[in-house]
Amino acid sequence: MRWITLDDFIDMYSKVVQRGGDFFLSKFTLNKKSRTKSAFDDTFVQSSNWWIIPKVRERWNKLITGNSNVNYKEHFVTKYCKGRSNLRILSLGAGTCSHELELAHYPNFSEIVCVDLAENRLAQAKAIATSQQLTNMKFITSDLNAYDFPESYFDVVLFNASLHHFEAVEKLLTTQVSKTLKPHGHVVINEYVGPNRLQYPTHQIKAINKALQRINPAFRKRFKTNFPKNRYFGSGIWRMIMADPSECVDSAAILPALHAHFHTLEEKGYGGNILMSVLKDISHHFVTPTPEQEAMLQKLFEFEDNYLETYDSDFVFGVYQKK
């Protein structure tokens, strides 16, 4: 367990550069809910994380659906919703609702309810829904303690990069989620399910650093800074709690809880054990890759594939059915 690392100081400096001093000062409050909201309340924040790289997203699609051009939402609708209509989705921790906005275009869904703490993000999503004339979406600013889960109402509960932000995952799934799902309803996740608070084992830290050295130093300059990324030290618990108390708070409990209380219909790992940490803060170099950069990405993909032959994936897409 790492309480503080050099990466914590680098990350704090980077956040000040990227998001300003007010964001940094927002972390100095004893209110955990306020610190969590500040992590997500800026709709237009720029970042340089692995998800901004198109080739990475194509890799996710390939590992989940078998087709680099088909994402998990299209796959879910085609496989599990074909011929069905008037379906209702509840998305908890919906954020900017980009995935929900995509699902709202399918005629299968009569109602998609997006719940999140971040008012700014929901407001932006609502504006997009209005501009696209999507009438099947609702936006609710709330936390779980305040949200009134209707009983046996939803056909699908969706967690897209949100379930790992909830405390007491097993309790959430077996009470509120089970209560609000119809009989045989589905839980769909696209989630980080690795170690709590990103406390990676030593062998993973070593593998991340080994992979990092496969990137040309010219492409290791951190986003909006002059600092090179030459080594990965891992995340310290203290900084993670200060930055966002909800981050990976009970992530390791996600799959055990789902396996224990729901039927597993489909579960696909898509890595992230190596790529997420290697590419953090340097992903902007690879958004529109040159042939040289594309070759580097391919080497990183192969490195992670080899790692996953021995270790479980830190990120998973899954579909589970209420027992």
Image (spheres, rainbow, N blue to C red):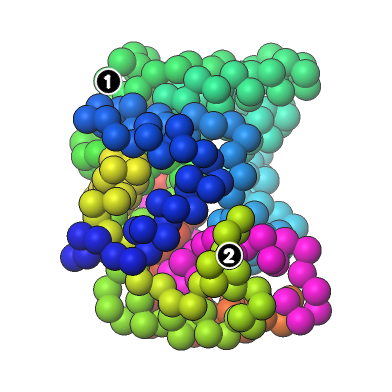
Number of numbered discs present?
2
* CA separation in Å, label 2 and label 1: 43 Å
Q: Which residue is mark 2?
A: 226
Q: Residues within 10 Å of mark 1 (few under 14, many from 20)?
A: few
* Residue 132 in the image, given as x and y percentages of width and height: 78, 22
Kindly identify the amino acid type of the residue bearing the numbered disc 1: Asn
Q: Which mark is residue 279?
A: none
Q: Residue at x 29, y 65 (%)?
A: 5
Residue that mark 1 sits on: 145
The answer to whether residue 77 is left or right of residue 197 is: right
- Please determine whether, in this image, residue 152 is positioned above or below residue 250: above
> Where residue 52 sits in the image (x, y, percent)?
64, 54
Residue 315 position, x and y percent, is 45, 60
Foreground tag (2 vs 1):
2
- Is 267 colored magenta in this rendering? yes
Per the image, is 4 magenta?
no
Query: Is any atom of residue 285 visible in this view?
Result: yes
Three-letter code, disc 2: Asn
Label 2 Cα neighbours within 10 Å, binned few <14 / some 14-19 / many ≥20: few
Magenta residues (range): 264-293
Q: Is residue 282 above or below residue 141?
A: below
State which quadrant residue 296 falls in. Answer: bottom right
Query: In the picture shown, does residue 135 fall above or below 108?
Result: above
Residue closest to the far right: 291
